[in-house]
Amino acid sequence: MAKRYYITTPIYYPSGNWHIGHCYTTVICDALARFHKMKGEEVFFLTGTDEHGQKVEKEALKRGITPLAFIDPLVSELKDMWRLLDVRYDRFLRTTDEDHVKCVQGIYQKLYESGDIYKAEYEGYYCTPCEAFWTESQLKEGKCPDCGREVTKQREESYFFRLSKYAPRILKLYEDNPQFLQPTSRVNEMVNNFLKAGLQDLSVSRTTVKWGIPLPFDEKHTAYVWIDALSNYISALGYGTEKDGLYRKFWPAQLHLVGKEIVRFHAIIWPAILMALGEPLPEQIYGHGWLLIGGEKLSKSKENARPELTDPYELVKRYGADAVRYYLLREIPFGSDGEYTTERFLLRINADLSNDLGNLVSRTQAMIVQNFGAVPPRGEAEEVDRELIAMCEGLFGRIDADMGALNAPEALAEIFALVGRANKYIDETTPWLLAKDPTKRARLGTVLYNLAETCRICAVALKPFLTVAPAKILRSFSCDENAGFDTLKFGVLKEGMAVEKLPPVFPRFDVKRELAEVEKLVGTPTPLPPSAGGGKAGLSSAGGGKVGMSSNGGGKAGSERSEGGSAHPERSEGSPQTKSEISIDDFAKVELKIGEVIACERVAKSDKLLHETVKIGDEVRSVVSGIAKFYTPEEMVGKKVVVVTNLKPVKLRGVLSEGMILCAEGEDGTLSLVSPEKLVASGATVK
Ligand code: ME8
């Protein structure tokens, strides 16, 4: 029976503003999942979103929309990000999914019936951003000990989980099973900071938070977000239901990979819950380090002040998914923190991908195509060949050991050590000189064969890590891009197989120029191209002017993703001015409604964008429009406008835009709002 490998990322807060730090956990999990799949194991890779809680409730309220209307576009963005980075999960769980909600209720019911959950009064300090309660003694200078932000004192009726009862068993778990929590430094943190002093029972319900899962035995209360969130690891598999086949097959998980700031929840609360449920514990919790900027954890608010490009969408668009994945998997020693700078990113991908790997492949292919036209015959091996061949043959063993220790940076270092050895082999065997001497043709063939095999082996070994280049390289040597690890042996290429000379697999970036461009991109808002903010992306009008969309219609507004542009998979870059004919059915796909602007403000750091709050019937929407040059916020309030209401929401300069306001564009480019000629109620359909 094939071995099973169940791996999970934490489920993400729908915070938006994703940065490269967010991609770290998930890209590592993806590489691990791909690695185990290639080993022939049955893999289940879980990720998702953590959607309940006060933070979401407040944000939605602020915008006058429902929590789900607030979250849905952010979830789509996150999924887009994973798609761009070629992350292939087996399930994307949302904590608002019905099966998850039922599972969490089942868990509460079970713990309540067994007496592990009881009712009492709670008094404590709550940190909304961390969704965590603290006792007075745990606060640091009166602030949240995790993030240093303000906490609020709360007192209310609450259900408690008997966490205190499980402290001795958790300590014993760490002692008996050193693999359970890794790296070892995290065990010391847990023991010294929390377990030594004994654990207090945990408040696991709120009456003040409405956006949460109602407890089945007391609907006034909603589930504490961390119990809700942690349960995803088993709810995703159908735990507690009749359809629990996946649970029986994959649980316990081999790995929960999490950032170090959430180890406490995973290594203390989660095992205690599972102990209380009488379920097996995951095999390992690994608390990885952070990507830092200026010595601090990379987070959107800190990043803004620095000329570093951290937007995954922009990074993938400029440098490709392979480059971003490679950087994340290679640069930071596993388990440690690592400083992120755009320069280091560029230096790393230039040195390893473009120089070492790219050159090896292009030199090898150029010489083969020039001298043989196809894979050359392989002759007798010399000492220098045997050394290269031995390194190729031992590669899988070495990367398997590294990946067994979750150490992707080391596994990649092994592969690139082979790439480096092969480049040195070229210098040692001087094939360009052999090519000049007809008596050395057999030797030239052997050298080039060995190099082609090394390229192929490196490409197969790189498949869990990079998702674009390995397939290209394999195809160019007439090999199956789906080749598995069983092909990691020397001598698979056969004489006469076609070889294609690829254009450079990895471009080389001019670091200085890139840094200057990136600094501009990050430091100042990128001006909107003509098609955005009043662009011509829209519906043609009868008159001489054009009716355009004063919002997010296919343009690009700065370095944040989802502002249109090709960074967003659903958007195209600009639009042609003349459109082909469409049928009435095509037109009917566009939903147009009358809205009333009830509030309006300028979008920070943009001279083109206004942020309107638009009432459309009973609904209130946030819309961003590129009309600040033509209307002041004051003028906008009270205006009746035509809104495209079924556009996929996007973010413009970090502000959610859930529609487009139509404008007519005059000959001189002036935008003028399109309004109903007679008095019409907001919400009325435009057709
Ligand atoms: O913590 N460097 O979600 P999240 C490395 N919802 N990793 C980083 C990072 C950085 N600068 N910034 C974020 C949550 N991450 C909870 C989890 S699980 C039951 C509930 C990582 O959206 C972070 O460490 O804040 C975590 O692994 C992931 O992004 C999601 O973080």
Image (spheres, grey):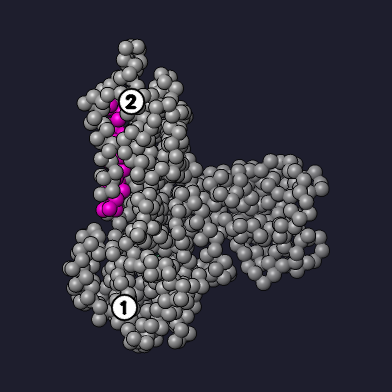
Q: Position of residue 241 (x, y in %)?
A: 45, 76
Determine if residue 469 is in view: no
Front-most of 506 and 5? 5
Using the rendered view, name the quadrant where residue 208 is placed.
bottom left
Number of other residues with Cα within 10 Å of mark 2, as a class: few under 14, some 14 to 19, many 20 or more: some
Front-most of 419 and 329? 419
Q: Check if residue 607 falls in the magenta segment.
A: no
To which residue does mark 2 refer?
378
Residue kind at label 2, given as amino acid type = Arg
Q: Is residue 551 above or below residue 238?
A: above
Task: Say which residue appears at 62% left-offset and 64% top-offset.
Answer: 621
Front-most of 671 and 484? 484
The quadrant of the rendering that contains the N terminus is: bottom left
Q: Position of residue 388 (x, y in %)?
A: 26, 31
- Looking at the rendering, the stretch of residues picked out in magenta corresponds to 402-425
Q: Position of residue 92 (x, y in %)?
A: 47, 62
Marks 2 and 1 sit apart, C-alpha to C-alpha, by 60 Å
Using the rendered view, name the quadrant where residue 488 is placed.
top left
- Relative placement, left or right, of 378 versus 674 is left
